[in-house]
Image (cartoon, rainbow, N blue to C red):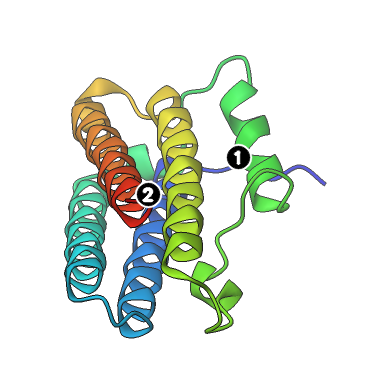
Amino acid sequence: MTIHFNADEVFQMAEQIERNGAKFYRIAAERTADPSAKQLLLDLAAMEVRHERIFAEMRSELTEEERKATFDPEGEAAAYLNAMADGHVFDLRDPSKRLTGKESLDDLFRIAIGIEKDSIVFYVTMTDLVPARFGRGKIDGIINEEQKHIALLSRAMSLLKK
């Protein structure tokens, strides 16, 4: 069964990814006693909420015509999104459900880095589907921020080992 996505649906998926990320970071923050780690995780949650708002704004600016179709002449981006939707690459389920409460701070950071990497891959694919006039530059900005999240988490992990 082939699934076709339009720009509206792609933005909805991006919003869900960001909601899931924010929820993950809030729950991870609740499960750590380290004050600086807790603040980092809460800051990351706030950033994800901001990203969700950006995607919602971008989606609200789509015209009816733009909501109907995505530009993907070779079908490659749609194939990726189909694989993602089927759970083969990455899924939109809530990553906080994977937390058992027994994770170390290092484990939480590793899981968070994995989530950030997955979101970057999704957003890079989104840029293939979203023409510049729809706000591709905003997606590029979010990709840059997600990369910074990985750097923040990696730095925090290295401090744990000292």
Label 1 CA crowd tier, 10 Å (few <14, some 14–19, many 20+): many
Residue position for label 2: 11
Q: Residue at x 73, y 52 (%)?
A: 86
Question: Few, some or many C-alpha atoms within 10 Å of disc 2 (few <14, some 14-19, many ≥20)?
Answer: many
Which of the 4 image quadrants contains residue 43?
bottom left
**Against 1, is 28 above or below?**
below
Q: Amino acid at mark 2?
A: Phe
Residue at x-position 38% and y-position 52%:
161
Q: Where does the image place residue 155, in percent across and percent down from the top left?
A: 28, 44
Left or right: residue 91 versus residue 140 is right
Q: Which mark is residue 10?
A: none
- Kind of element beneath mark 1: helix
- Lower sequence index among marks 1 and 2: 2
132 relative to 69, above or below? above
58 on left or right of 79:
left
- Disc 1 designates what residue? 81
Q: Secondary structure at mark 2?
A: helix
Q: Tell whether 157 sits left or right of 76.
A: left
Rounded to the nearest angstrom, the CA distance separating label 1 from label 2 is: 12 Å
Against 117, residue 104 (above or below) is: below
**Residue 5: image x %, image y %?**
55, 43
Residue projecting furthest to the front: 162
